[in-house]
Amino acid sequence: LQEGLASAQRVFSIIDEKPDVVEKSNAVVIQSFNDKIVYENVSFKYETSRAEVLNKVNLEIKKGEVVAVVGHSGAGKSTLVDLLPRFYDPTGGRILIDGIPNNDLTFASLRSLMGIVTQHTILFNDTIFNNIAYGIRDFDPKKVAAAAEAANALEFIEEFPDKFETMIGDKGLRISGGQRQRLAIARALLKNPPILILDEATSSLDSESEQKVQAAIENLMKDRTVLVIAHRLSTIQNANKIVVLERGHVVETGTHAELIARENSVYRFFH
């Protein structure tokens, strides 16, 4: 009983935790993404930090563009992309989607526009099928299989005796890192979002897994608006715009060719 009480206290302390980001009572629903995303003088500082992680960042991402964000560790890259789906709110400035501040939108409608693939994939102790279809109420098994195929995941799924009904263990520990990433990409493909966020999705993989995951990512990026934090040169080279962050400031913006040609370019140091 005492052990149970101690566990209950921990559980209820989490349940009672007040969220830092809250939805407005009069929040509006956004149905689609049609024009552009604008970061307008966006600044951010964590409560535990004295210095600002982002300082008056201005950025425009037009529909259909691939925008790559590069910079040293701690430059604010992940924070920049985390502000878009409102995992945090800016401490200064605002982010607009089709002219509407993202903090005026309902969480459900805002996040329904986005698919996110990060370095650390969140998977559950469930079947491969349920992990791909996670968060989608009405799904067609044929679409799940098609998403897995487009994510280059079908080849390893078919090798398991139980195929899509294979249990993958807590956090997907029964499958490899590259396989976990391909399931995350299949999940994003099934959701079919107009906006895609990629946060160093291949950085922790070996070269063979990286090639397969990169091919899946290229399928995922087709006909979408993409905000990508990348270290792989091919992804950066093909971006419509590259944003170079340094200590929370945007120090350079341009295409790969423009930044390489620029004298005293900070971007050159990454290559």
Image (cartoon, rainbow, N blue to C red):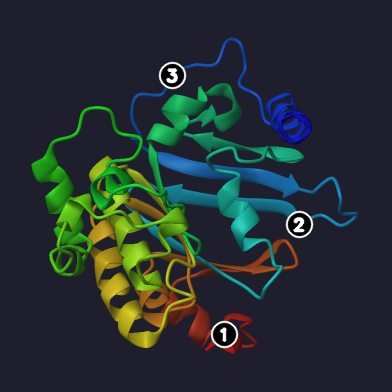
Q: Quadrant of residue 235?
A: bottom left
Disc 3 versus disc 1: distance between alpha carbons? 40 Å
Q: Amino acid at mark 1?
A: Phe
* Residue 190, x across and y down, in percent: 24, 45
The disc placed on residue 45 is none
User: Which secondary structure, mark 3?
Assistant: loop
Q: How many marks?
A: 3
> What is the number of the mark on residue 270?
1
Q: Amino acid at mark 2?
A: Val
Q: Amino acid at mark 3?
A: Val
List the residue tagged with mark 2. Answer: 53
Which residue position holds label 3? 29
Say above or below: 45 vs 235.
above
The first of marks 1 and 2 along the sequence is: 2
Cα distance in 3D space between marks 1 and 2:
20 Å
Among all residues in the image, which is located at the extreme right? 50
Q: Work out whether residue 48 or residue 121 is closer to the camera in this orientation and state it.
A: 121
Mark 3–mark 2 distance (CA, rounded to whole Å): 30 Å
Q: Is residue 162 above or below residue 201?
A: above
Is residue 27 shown left or right of residue 14?
left
The residue depicted at 49 percent of the width and 77 percent of the height is 231
* Secondary-structure class at tag 1: helix
Say which quadrant the N terminus sits in: top right
